[in-house]
Image: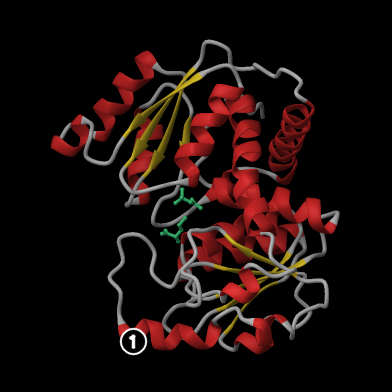
Amino acid sequence: MSLKGRSFIDLSDFERYELRQFLDAGADLKRKQKRGEPHELLKGKSLAMIFMKSSTRTRVSFEVGMTQLGGHALYLEPGGSQLGRGETIGDTAQVLSRYCDVIMARVFAHSDVTDLAKYATVPVINGLSDLLHPCQIMADMLTIEEHRGSLEGQKIVYVGDSNNVSNSIMQGCTIMGMDVTIGSPKGYTPSEVILKKATHLSKKYGTTLEVVNNPDEAVKGADVIYTDTFFSMGQERSKEKEAALMPFQVNKVLVGKAKKDVIVMHCLPAHRDEELTSEVMDGPHSVVFDQAENRLHAQKGIMALIV
Ligand code: CP
Ligand code: NVA
């Protein structure tokens, strides 16, 4: 199926060859940008960016990405549009579709972004929901490929709180042929629904997918260790959750239990010395700022193909 006109909401909506096209487009646009070659593939196009939550990377990378592609991006801040005053998602989607060529949204309830896509007549991109963060994982896979040469057969271990980032890892990395391990304490493991869907994908693509409750066991043989904040946006801090997750902190000792050349990833923003020590984040295994940069390139690839 052609990618033009498709929404980008959930990595499991795509086949491996389709995600490959997005990744290759992102890598190609990255090369062009580095060489200073013009690549104004979306000249005259406009992107509406709806933010219901805070952002640094997503906002800046989409806005700059659209500028580099020759288009224009509009920022609708949290509470800044009529959505905050009760205009429905459906009406908003229809109105924005009359002005813009693509919509990106960062939302709380995942149904908000699927509803946007249902009513919009232009493609909708999920810039993070409580359930999924697909653009992040596309940037991450581009980064893994740059550092490890390939995706297939690599073991990625996510340690910490099971959340939107780990859910998208379970989908995207599985589709691309990676072996995925989630190391989370009891009570903070992936939901049954997400696990079932990802298990289906791992069977389809012949990969392994496991959930373990012991961080040392999880990182054995890891090519990639990935972590994220203990408390995602919209979640209340709690001492109980912090205590459960602290043993899953990515520190020098844990990293020492993975492969010698393991790369360490984090979607950022990091809570230094909570889920990830500064020593590791600023150390030789860390690729966290490459990931952040690749948000720009990966998303340009996505926009160039769907718009
Ligand atoms: N990783 C990520 O999505 O960062 P922001 O919250 O800064 O957009
Ligand atoms: N899991 C984090 C990711 C932030 C980019 C959150 O949802 O807050």
Q: Residue at x 83, y 77 (%)?
A: 260
CA neighbours of label 1 inside 10 A, class few (<14), some (14 to 19), many (20+): few
Which residue is the site of mark 1? 240
Residue closer to the observer: 119 or 200 = 119
Decide: is 7 above or below 169.
above
Identify the residue at horizontal 54%, vertical 83% (top origin): 248
Coordinates of residue 293 in the picture (x, y in percent): 63, 45
Give residue 95's quadrant in the image.
top left
Q: Note whether residue 100 is visible.
A: yes
Q: Is residue 128 above or below residue 42?
A: below
Residue type at mark 1: give it. Answer: Glu
Q: Residue furthest right?
A: 149
Q: Is residue 6 visible?
A: no
Question: Looking at the image, which residue sits at the far left?
Answer: 85
Q: Quadrant of residue 278?
A: bottom right
Height in image: 267 above or below 26? below
In screen coordinates, is 201 left or right of 131?
A: right
Q: Secondary structure at mark 1?
A: helix
Q: Position of residue 40 (x, y in %)?
A: 65, 16
